[in-house]
Amino acid sequence: MAKTKEKSRYNNIEKILPSGGPNEAPLDMSNFIQLARESDAEEQELSDFMDMKYGEALDKFLESNPGKTEDDFIKLIRMPMESGGKVIKFSDYKKPQVKELDLASLFTPGKTLAELTESERAAVSNLLKMTFGKKD
């Protein structure tokens, strides 16, 4: 059963949805997914408005900058990617730790992987997972 929760200025949740466990009916997501889209007329109105604002800004730029072109205006209003912020290299602060793994020291010299017992293979597998992380 869904609980209702009062909206506050910190929380926009209107209704808590069920998590969809094995004892719950699946949600029909088409009821919840709505695209943020205006009607065609509203989109056209917004497009016309932004075209008008662009035209006004371009006219003002050309009046105050004789000899400049629309291309100069476009270059001015576009944000260059290099001004996106400071890049932090974590390697400058902490050097990566190199892990050394000596599996041969755990077994008799000259023993191959094929010659390991089931418990020894499990130990090797466990050491590799702990050292390099589990990758399935």
Image (cartoon, grey):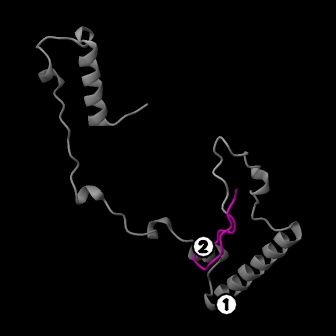
Residue positioned 16% across, 27% down in the render: 102
Q: Is residue 86 left or right of residue 31?
A: left
Q: Residue furthest top?
A: 115
List x then y, in percent, for residue 100.
Answer: 17, 34
List x then y, in percent, for residue 58.
Answer: 69, 82
Position of the C terminus by quadrant = top left
Q: Is residue 52 left or right of residue 93?
A: right
- Disc number at residue 63? 1
Secondary structure beneath dot 1 equals helix
Residue positioned 28% across, 14% down in the render: 118
C-alpha gap between disc 2 and disc 1: 48 Å
Question: Mark 1: which amino acid?
Answer: Glu
Position of the N terminus by quadrant = bottom right
Secondary structure beneath dot 2 equals loop
State whether the magenta stretch is mostly helix, strand or loop.
loop
- Disc number at residue 11? 2
Mark whose residue sits in front, 2 or 1: 2
Comparing 74 with 44, the one in front is 44
Q: Is residue 129 left or right of residue 3?
A: left
**First of labels 2, 1 by sequence position:** 2
54 w.r.t. 88: above or below: below
14 within the magenta span: yes
69 w.r.t. 13: above or below: below
- What range of the chain is rendered magenta? 1-15
Q: Is residue 123 left or right of residue 83?
A: left
